Amino acid sequence: MLVLTQAGIGGSVVVASMSIGGTAPMKAPWLVTASFALLGAGLFASVFHLGRPTKAWRVWMGWRTSWLSREAIALNAFAGAASGALALLWAGDEALVSRLPAGSAGPLALAGGMPAFLWAAPVVVLGSVALFAQAMVYADTHREFWRIGVTAPRFLGSAVVLGSALALAIMPSAPLAVVVIVANLCKLALDVSVLKHGDSDSTIWTQLRRTASLQRGVLRPVLAIRLLAGSVGGIFVPFAMGTGAVAPAWGIAVFATCLLGEVAERLLFFASVSPDKMPGMP
């Protein structure tokens, strides 16, 4: 759920950021459509990790005290902004408008001609708010591995990695390949930073030391998949695309591999957290 919604946010924000100072890229409607599909899949999947999915609607009721409720509100607000951007981008698609009856083409063309800032700014702002709310759901548990100073950059990194990789798959270019490479380098550095806590001769086993031990021990295969996918799909293949060594169609493989790497990272995020006490115990 987290990875899919962050991919959807990332793709939409990439388009908005490219459009906010001028006009949207030619293939922007397709990129926002793919992003919206990923966001929708993530929101749909989120219902099933609840204990009682039939009462998922009640998640809205605790917004005053619950970050889970605030996350739900923020994600749905972002979905509304993204759907509006999607409609306006397709309304501005000349190829689509030209096939419509004359009576409807005029209003659509007028809507599609709106300044990009009017739809791009809400997408960027609400996307950022949604990512922060997602991070706070876990930071509010006060577990060291999930502290806000690491979790917020981690979730933001996933959105940038997957959003730029999706953009590279749909509208490949050398500048986007550079963005994918830089984003993956930063994200991989963040992901492996916890491993340094495993190199200690102290008799005290801190939360982060236990997390590092788990990732270097029983979770090592997952860590290997995460590093391999991030390196190959997020660095080497985009570099080959940027230099023209491989065809632009490899962008699809870049996104698929980056998605695999982020799923593996998120598994480590949940499986290796090690609090000092069990939830609910004094």
Image: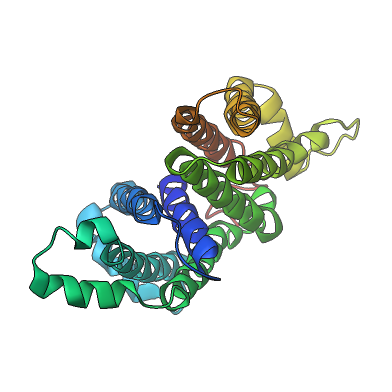
- Pick whichever, 86 or 200, lies toward us: 86
Instruction: Give whichever of 32, 256 is nearer the camera.
Output: 32
Q: Position of residue 108 (x, y in %)?
A: 22, 72
Outermost residue, right side: 201
Left or right: where does residue 90 sit relative to residue 158?
Answer: left
Residue sitting at 53 percent across and 40 percent down? 266
Picture quarter containing residue 63? Answer: bottom left
Name the one closer to the observer, 168 or 150.
168
- Give the image's coloring scheme: rainbow
Residue 281 x/y as whole percent: 56, 53
Q: Is residue 83 above or below residue 245?
A: below
The quarter of the image holding the C terminus is: bottom right
With 266 as the anchor, is 252 left or right in this view? left
Lateral position of residue 30 relative to residue 169, left or right: left
Rendered view: 16 above or below 263? below
Q: Position of residue 103 (x, y in %)?
A: 9, 74
Q: Nearer the viewer, residue 149 or 50?
A: 149
Q: Residue at x 25, y 56 (%)?
A: 95
Q: Report the residue at 70% width, 25% height from top.
A: 216
Residue 193 % position (x, y): 76, 40
Using residue 215 as the reference point, say whether residue 266 is left or right of it: left
Identify the residue at horizontal 61%, vertical 36% (top origin): 272
